[in-house]
C-alpha cells in the first residue's frame, strides 16, 4: 500500500472478495522523520488501513532500495545509459524481495493497485495484458518479471479505469487522495535529476563539450546524465535549426548533437530478454514494440542472435531510441516480454 487511491481500493476489493488482507507499506527513500512526502504517504496508508480494518506493516527498506535500485541507476548513468529504475524496482524490490518476504509470512498472493490484467490458461501459465484503462496501463513496467512471479500476483483494478477507481472510493467513503499520483522516479525531489546527482553522485555532473556528428565543437554541456537521446531542450547552442541529442560519448565526455532528420532509426538491439511465458514466441510473425511506457507501439520483426541478444527491425523508424530503456513486445493487448535496449546504430547495421 503506497498511500494512494489505487492500492486502497485494491485492498477493499480483495477484502470484499473474501481474501484475508494485510497491508504492507515500504519506506524506500528517506524515512518519514526527514522527508515530509514520505511522512504524508505513511499517514495516508495508516488512515486507509484503519478505515478498511486491516493490519498494516511498515518495512524500512531504504538500504535495500539504495543497493538494489539507486546504485545500479547511478552506475547506468555513468555508463551513458538512460535507465528505467521503476522496472528495476519492480524486479528487485516490489515483486522480488517483497514477494519473498510475504511468502515467508505465509501469504499466498501479493496484490497491488497496478492497472494491468492477468490471465491463466488451461496449462496454468499466466499471461500479462494491458489494463482496461489505456491511459493508466502499467504492463510496460511489469514486462521484466518472470512467470514464477506472475503465478503469485493479483491486480484487483485490472478491469477498472482510474476514474472508476476514484468514483468507487468516493461512493464507499474511502479516501480518494484527489490530485495525488505515484511518482515514477520516487527518489527525485523538486530539483529533479540535477539536484539528486549533486547530492549523491556529483562526479557525474562534470561539464564537457558539445559536438556535432562530424566532431565540430559547438558548446559545453552541464553533465551527460542530464541529457537523453532525442532531447531538444537545454542544449543552448545557437543554430538555424534546433539541435537534438544524438549520442553521449562517455569516454570523451562529449555530447553529440544533430538535427531532427539525423534521429530516426530502423533497428534496435536488446539484451536481457525476458519472455513472460518462459518460452520464446513464434518470431516468424511480427509484433508491436514500445520503446517507452508512453510511446506508441510500432510493428516490428524480431531476430534472436546466437548470443541471446535480440534485434528489432522496425516497420516505421523511431527517433528517440535510448540505450538503458526497455523494448517491450506486444501481441495485440498481450505483453509478451521485453529486452534491455543497448544499441541503435545510425547505419542500421551491426558488425559481427
Image (cartoon, rainbow, N blue to C red):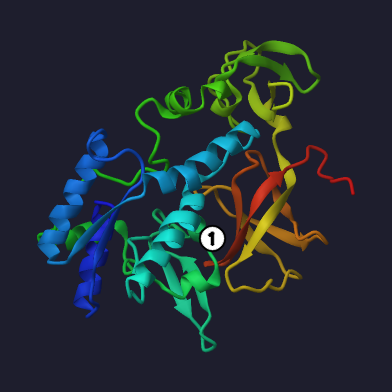
Where residue 320 sits: x, y (%)? 62, 39
Q: Which of 347 and 96 is in front in this view?
A: 96
* Image quadrant where one finds the N terminus: bottom left
The residue that appears at 66% across and 64% down in the rendered structure is: 287
Report the residue marked by disc 1: 143
Q: How many marks?
A: 1
The residue that appears at 61% across and 32% down in the rendered structure is: 78
Residue found at the far bottom of this picture: 122
Where residue 186 sits: x, y (%)? 38, 41
Q: Is residue 95 above or below residue 187?
A: below
Q: Which of 229 and 15 is in front in this view?
A: 15
Q: Tell me which corner region of the image, top left, top right, bottom left or bottom right, holds residue 15.
A: bottom left
Q: Tell me which corner region of the image, top left, top right, bottom left or bottom right, holds residue 285.
A: bottom right
The residue that appears at 59% across and 34% down in the rendered structure is: 77
Q: Is residue 228 left or right of residue 307?
A: left
Q: Is residue 319 left or right of residue 53?
A: right
Mark 1 falls on what kind of element?
loop
The residue that appears at 49% across and 60% down in the rendered structure is: 142
Where residue 195 sits: x, y (%)? 42, 24
Q: Is residue 133 above or below residue 178?
A: below
Q: Which of 334 and 5 is in front in this view?
A: 5
- Report if residue 12 is visible in the image: yes
Q: In this view, does 333 lie to the left or right of 266?
A: left
Q: Tell me which corner region of the image, top left, top right, bottom left or bottom right, holds residue 137.
A: bottom left
Amino acid at each position: 500500500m503506497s498511500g494512494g487511491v489505487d492500492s486502497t481500493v485494491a485492498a477493499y476489493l480483495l477484502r470484499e472478495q473474501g481474501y484475508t488482507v494485510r497491508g504492507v507499506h515500504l519506506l524506500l527513500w528517506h524515512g518519514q522523520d526527514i522527508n515530509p512526502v514520505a511522512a504524508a504517504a505513511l499517514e495516508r496508508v495508516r488512515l486507509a488501513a484503519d478505515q478498511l480494518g486491516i493490519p498494516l506493516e511498515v518495512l524500512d527498506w531504504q538500504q535495500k532500495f539504495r543497493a538494489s535500485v539507486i546504485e545500479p541507476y547511478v552506475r547506468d548513468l555513468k555508463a551513458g545509459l538512460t535507465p528505467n529504475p521503476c522496472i528495476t524496482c519492480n524486479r528487485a524490490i516490489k515483486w522480488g524481495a517483497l514477494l519473498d518476504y510475504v511468502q515467508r509470512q505465509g501469504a499466498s498472493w501479493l496484490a497491488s493497485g497496478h492497472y494491468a490484467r492477468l490471465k491463466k490458461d488451461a496449462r496454468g501459465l499466466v499471461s500479462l495484458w494491458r489494463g482496461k484503462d489505456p491511459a493508466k496501463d502499467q504492463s510496460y513496467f511489469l514486462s521484466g518479471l518472470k512467470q514464477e512471479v506472475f503465478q503469485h500476483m493479483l491486480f484487483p483494478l485490472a478491469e477498472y479505469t482510474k476514474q472508476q477507481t476514484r468514483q468507487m472510493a468516493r461512493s464507499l467513503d474511502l479516501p480518494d487522495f484527489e490530485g495525488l499520483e505515484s511518482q515514477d522516479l520516487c527518489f527525485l525531489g523538486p530539483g529533479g535529476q540535477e539536484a539528486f546527482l549533486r547530492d549523491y553522485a556529483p562526479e557525474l555532473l562534470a561539464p564537457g563539450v558539445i559536438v556535432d556528428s562530424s566532431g565540430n565543437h559547438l558548446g559545453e554541456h552541464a553533465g551527460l546524465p542530464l541529457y537523453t537521446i532525442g532531447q531538444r531542450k537545454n542544449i543552448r547552442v545557437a543554430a538555424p535549426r534546433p539541435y537534438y541529442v544524438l549520442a553521449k560519448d562517455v569516454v570523451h565526455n562529449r555530447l553529440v548533437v544533430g538535427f531532427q532528420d539525423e534521429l530516426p532509426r530502423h533497428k534496435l538491439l536488446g539484451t536481457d530478454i525476458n519472455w513472460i511465458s518462459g518460452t520464446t514466441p513464434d518470431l516468424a510473425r511480427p509484433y508491436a514494440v514500445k520503446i517507452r511506457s508512453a510511446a506508441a507501439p510500432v510493428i516490428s520483426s524480431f531476430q534472436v542472435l546466437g548470443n541471446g541478444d535480440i534485434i528489432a527491425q522496425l516497420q516505421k523508424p523511431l527517433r528517440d531510441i535510448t540505450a538503458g530503456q526497455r523494448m517491450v513486445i506486444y501481441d495485440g493487448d498481450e505483453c509478451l516480454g521485453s529486452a534491455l535496449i543497448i544499441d541503435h546504430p545510425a547505419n542500421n547495421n551491426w558488425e559481427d
